[in-house]
Amino acid sequence: MDADLQRSAILDRIPGWAGRQRIEQPLSGGITNRNYRVQLGAEIFVVRIPSKAAGWLGIDRRIEHQASLLAAAAGVGPEVVAFLEPEGVLVTRFIQGVPVSDADVHLPGTLSRVAESLQAIHHAGVVPAAFSAFRVVERYAATAREHRVPIPSAFEPASAIATSIEQALPLAAPVLCHNDLLNANFIDDGDRIRVVDWEYAAMGDPFFDLGNFAVNHGLAEEEQSFLLEAYAGKADEAALARLHLMRLMSDFREAMWGVVQQGASELDFDFRSYARRHFERLLASAADPRFRGWLAQASA
């Protein structure tokens, strides 16, 4: 079926939308799904139509829906309007606000508000799914091998690094985590930093969210300390070490995500270069003379 006809047929199935005049506009920025801004009269919605890559990437649309509902109830995510199965199409209300720029995330005020939103997310509730970056990279490697996607040589040294990190980190009580904290997923509504795109959400270590946010935006040392103080009230050596180590695991996850996407994605995007950049940053971070110290401090 033609993509436009397919989209129209999906939109007609949303309760109350069939036969109504709609203004549809593709939303840019996503590299996994097709997202649309849809206006019906005075109301504006966002419709996410999943790609075929979801199964390869371990995305469970029902978990995404449940996490989205919890995030909305916590005042962080957008209101959920509808969920269509079996496709897993998610419809949310459009959040009126402004994007959070690359420069904005380094401002103390923004870091404080991000920490506030993360606190709300991490206390939002429970979904029946677990996230571990250590298991995700293993699963992505198995998926790549199954579909004969070449795995870069950097995977082996990265795996050894991951093993040392997993052995050093203490077990953390699992909380609801977003696990994909890019500022492209942030909207400033004037009151709070709202967070969208919950497809990787699951119960996990809150320090993965913190490390994921920090490495995605290149936070400096003092900015990481500020973030931790705003989030937890303090930034001791053990917490800073855990954040540093989870920065590495975030890059490992992103690198292997890029590897799998080389075989799974239908989008025009250079996933090979994406994977290479994250492997290079991971290995460079592990070569930092402080790496062994982080391992010791995290386990102290």
Image: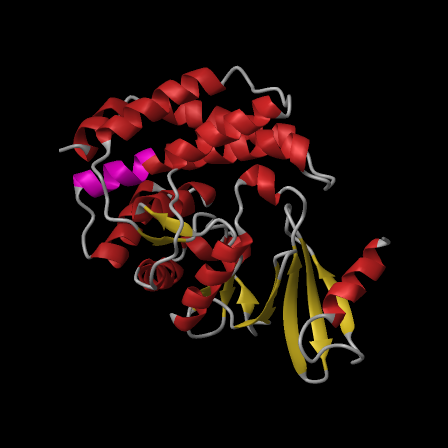
Q: Is 155 included in the stretch rendered in magenta? A: no
Residue at 51 percent across and 25 percent down: it is 141
Q: Is residue 14 left or right of residue 139?
A: right
User: How many callouts does the rendering have?
Assistant: 0
Asked if 282 appears above or below 223 in the picture, the reply is above
Please identify the quarter of the rendering in which residue 262 is found: top right
Identified at 52% across, 52% down, the residue is 199
Q: Is residue 175 shown left or right of residue 153?
A: left
In the image as oriented, which residue stretches furthest toward the left? 300
Q: Position of residue 178 (x, y in %)?
A: 43, 53
- The reply to whether residue 169 is visible in this rendering is yes
Q: Position of residue 205 (x, y in %)?
A: 31, 45
Magenta span: chief secondary structure = helix
Q: Quadrant of residue 270?
A: top right
Protein image colouring: secondary structure
Residue 119's spot in the image, x, y percent? 31, 61
Q: Position of residue 20 (x, y in %)?
A: 78, 80
As rendered, which of 270 and 156 lies closer to the eye?
156
> Which region of the structure is painted magenta?
237-245
268 vs 263: above or below: below
Q: Residue at x 58, y 33 (%)?
A: 258
Residue 288 seen in the figure: no
Q: Observer-nearest residue: 212 or 228?
A: 212
